[in-house]
Structures are given as C-alpha cells and as structure tokens.
Amino acid sequence: MLQRLLAVHKDISTASEPWILLPYLYTLRKKGISAEFEYKMMVDAIDDFCLQLPNGADDYLAEIREFALRLYCKASDNGVKYFLDKTPRYHLIIEELMNLFPNGKFIFLWRNPLSVIASIIDTWREGKWEIDAYKIDLYRGLANLINAHNKYSLLACSVNYELLVNDPKNELARVFDYLDLHFDDQFINDYTSVLLTGRMGDTEGHRKYKTITKDPIEKWKHTINNPFRKVWCRRYLRWIGKDRLSSIGYDLLVLLKELDDVRFNQNAFLRDLMHIIKLNLKHLINQGQ
C-alpha cells in the first residue's frame, strides 16, 4: 500500500520487487549462497581482483552502485527523481545498501508483529500454520532492520502501518517532506490506480481494498486464535523484547494483553493439531529410513 501511495507521485517510479542487488552484494560474502561454480572460491577470486583496483573493494562497490542506478533509470519514467526499490529480503543486506547509496532515501515500514505473522499465514500459506518457513524474515530480518534503523535513524524515515491507515494525510505528508517532494491529498484516492504487474509482492490488498481502511489492524485476531498459535506468538514477542519493540513504536505488554484476549477458535485448533501430528509422523518416517 505504501509503495503504491508513493508511486502516485510523478517523480517516483517503481516495480513490484526488483531483488537485483541481493546477488551482487553477496559476491563479497562467504556464506549465504550455494552454486555450481564453487561460490566460496568465487568470493576469494573477487577479493583478489579487488586488490588490483586502485581503491580496492570500494571501486568494486562503486561499480555495483552505478550498474544499479543505470538499471533503475531504464526502469523509470523520464525525468523522475526517484526509483523506489521495495524488496523485503533486502533486510539481509540493509547496512550494505545504506552504505552503497549514501545519497539515497530509506523508508522503514513497521507493522504490529502479530499482524505480520497473520498476513504471512493468510497470504502465503492459505491459513495453515507453517510459520517456520519464514523464520529468516521474522527473526534475522526484523533484527537486521531494527539494528540498521537505530544506527542510521537520522538518515531514514520511519513509518508505522497503523498510524498510516489511521491518519494517512499527516503520515504521507511527513514521508513526502522527507523525500523533498510535494504532497497532494489526492494521492490518497489515486493510489489504487498504480498497478504492479510483477510476480513478487502481495496483491491481496490491491484486490480486496479500494481505499485505505483500518480493517487490517485487527485482522490478525482471526488468524492467531488458538493455544498453539498464541503460545508461539507469545514467545516471539518476548524474543523481540520490550526495548526493540519500543524502538519501532510498539509496547510489549499491550501486545501480550491483546494476544491473551483473543477468543478461541476450535476449527483452527483442530487443523493445527492435525498439522503437527503429520509433521511428527513425517519426522519419524524419515528417521526410520
């Protein structure tokens, strides 16, 4: 939603999720990729090559930056000021990105962690409690983003989803001020006209909502609604911790209280119970083999 609200502006172009910088910045990392051509050996070779450059790895990264900027320009309308690259897995390279683009603008979008979990389950797992598939985003990703935001808070703009849907006019005006762009109230009505045609990204909101609505704020309570799910989420909130939650605008005790107050749903409970039994049986069969 925020991506499309920003892309309404004539000086901002975007694409659904480019992902283009992940492989290039990983060429300097020893871990994280497996490839047929011996990935770790490639990193050593690139390290050696960088030693031949006048400014070492800085020259190499500068060329990656120029390469990305050229692609962004080609993917943009003529004369725009910004290309907006919204790629969720950039949380893996967030500090490298902020160093790579010292003149860039960085917007950190936060949402109630319980809503994030429910959105993952409902959007990508068809309501099934298969949350382990997204641990890299929920744990490492969130920690990376919070650390980077706290470290570079003076250079970035922080937005809370709940505040955005409750007061879109003032929140968007603040974001556009950060971008040094004019804000028009009409953007709030026109954002649904922005179409993102790529295969990446969540299109459910675009299909379901034709205007900014507060409905999704409480929607998580219809998904996290049985003892299995509530116990997992309680542990997750405590892992995030009071200080980290506070730094992004949330209160641990308030979230725990809201979680405890959610009504029990028997259907979801039975479905999760069967899922756990199947996983355990699969594990036992694999062990037997």
Image (cartoon, rainbow, N blue to C red):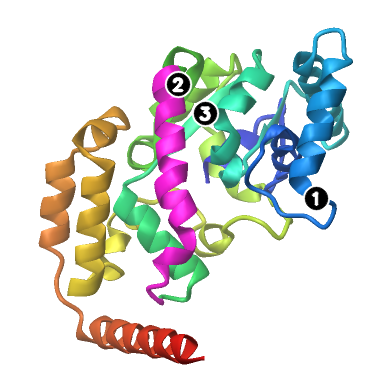
Q: Position of residue 86 (x, y in %)?
A: 62, 40
Name the one closer to the observer, 13 or 21: 21
Pointer 2: residues within 10 angstroms few (<14), some, or many (20+)?
some
Q: Give, as a single range, the part of the protein colored magenta.
A: 128-151
The three-letter code of the residue at mark 2 reads Arg
Q: Which element is circle 1 on?
A: loop
Which of the two marks, 2 or 3, is nearer to us in this view? 3
Q: Which element is circle 2 on?
A: helix
Pointer 1: residues within 10 angstroms few (<14), some, or many (20+)?
few
Q: Which mark is residue 107?
A: 3
Residue ID for mark 2: 174
The three-letter code of the residue at mark 1 reads Glu
**Residue pictured at 12% horizontal, 44% vertical:** 253
Residue 135, magenta (yes or no)? yes
C-alpha gap between disc 2 and disc 1: 47 Å
Image position of 175 with respect to 207: above or below: above
Residue ID for mark 1: 38
The three-letter code of the residue at mark 3 reads Ile
**Residue pictured at 79% horizontal, 42% vertical:** 41
Left or right placement of residue 74 versus residue 5 in this view: right
Image position of 239 with respect to 130: above or below: above
Residue furthest to the top: 54
Pointer 3: residues within 10 angstroms few (<14), some, or many (20+)?
some
**Residue pictured at 31% horizontal, 69% vertical:** 223
Residue 58, magenta (yes or no)? no
Whether tag 2 and tag 3 are in contact, CB under 8 A, the answer is: no
Left or right placement of residue 275 versus residue 199 in this view: left
